[in-house]
């Protein structure tokens, strides 16, 4: 832990996120050199990580996005917005912010495997392994995290806080739910106090 501000605690600093993105970028550069991969960001949470990660990969690549919507029981997903680029014959790297139960990624991988991709791998910033319901391959991951409610760097609460530059755990979710405005102010103040750059 890198800081404590009441109901919010910074658990992964901006420096640690940047450093891990550099390490993963190096690995991905080695693995995908001369393969012209397509990095596919799963909206919306992957956006900050995708943006930082691709700038650490030193080989040509394409970037595209897809969005998912959930339906029915058991976390079934369908593609709400598809990639513009055809994935057929391409080396596809799915970029996620977090894998939790694994249901989303498991469905997504199965969907993409039907598209005759040359290869399929996933890089997730966070692996919330204690919550896993289905086993799903994770070729690259940034950090393993516990079963806590996290915010920032793409992770949201009701669509907000994705713009925090580091990752925070919410110790008092009930307060956030009942008094989101004042707690919102608090987390941005704490966030500002913690920033070194
Ligand atoms: C998050 C995350 C994964 C999914 C993981 O997306 O980006 O796609 O949940 O959960 P699972 O492993 O339990 O299936 P979310 O639905 O929160 O959308 P967002 O990225 O737009 O915030």
Image: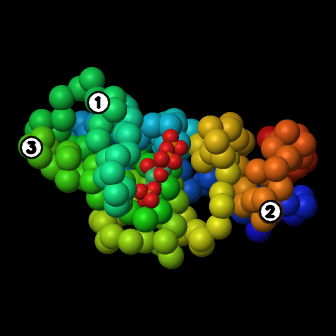
Where residue 174 sits in the image (x, y, percent)? 78, 59
Badge 1 or badge 2: first in the primary sequence: 1
User: Which mark, by number, is residue 116?
Assistant: 3
In the image as oriented, which residue stretches furthest toward the top?
84
| Picture quadrant where residue 169 is located | bottom right
Label 1 crowd (10 A; few <14 / some 14-19 / many >=20): some
Task: Give the side of residue 194 with respect to residue 76, left or right.
Answer: right
Label 2 crowd (10 A; few <14 / some 14-19 / many >=20): few
For the point 38% across and 45% down, the residue is 70
For label 1, the SS is loop
For label 3, the SS is loop
Q: Nearer the viewer, mark 1 or mark 2?
A: 2
| Picture quadrant where residue 61 is located | top left
User: Which mark, by number, is residue 172?
Assistant: 2
Q: Is mark 2 within 8 Å of ligand 1?
A: no
Q: Nearer the viewer, residue 12 or 44?
A: 44
For the point 17% across and 39% down, the residue is 90
The answer to whether residue 59 is visible is no
Label 3 crowd (10 A; few <14 / some 14-19 / many >=20): few
For label 2, the SS is loop
Where residue 143 sits in the image (x, y, percent)? 54, 64
Label 1 to label 3, Cα distance in Å?
16 Å
Marks 3 and 2 close (CB-CB < 8 Å): no
Task: Give the side of residue 188 with respect to residue 62, left or right.
Answer: right
In the image as oriented, which residue stretches furthest toward the front?
72
């Amino acid at each position: 832990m890198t800081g404590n501000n009441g109901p919010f605690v910074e658990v992964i600093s901006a420096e640690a996120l940047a450093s891990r993105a550099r390490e993963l970028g190096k690995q991905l550069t080695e693995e995908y050199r001369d393969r012209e991969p397509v990095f596919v960001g799963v909206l919306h949470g992957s956006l900050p990580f995708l943006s930082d990660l691709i700038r650490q990969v030193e080989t040509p690549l394409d970037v595209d996005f897809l969005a998912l919507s959930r339906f029915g029981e058991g976390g079934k997903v369908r593609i709400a917005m598809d990639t513009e680029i055809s994935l057929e014959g391409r080396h596809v790297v799915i970029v996620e912010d977090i894998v939790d139960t694994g249901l989303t990624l498991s469905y997504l991988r199965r969907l993409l495997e039907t598209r005759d991709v040359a290869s399929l791998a996933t890089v997730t910033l966070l692996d919330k392994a204690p919550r896993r319901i289905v086993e799903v391959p994770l070729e690259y991951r940034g950090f393993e995290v516990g079963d806590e409610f996290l915010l920032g760097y793409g992770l949201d609460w009701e669509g907000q806080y994705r713009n925090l530059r580091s990752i925070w755990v919410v110790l008092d979710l009930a307060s956030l739910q009942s008094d989101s405005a004042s707690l919102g102010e608090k987390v941005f103040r704490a966030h500002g106090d913690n920033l070194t750059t």
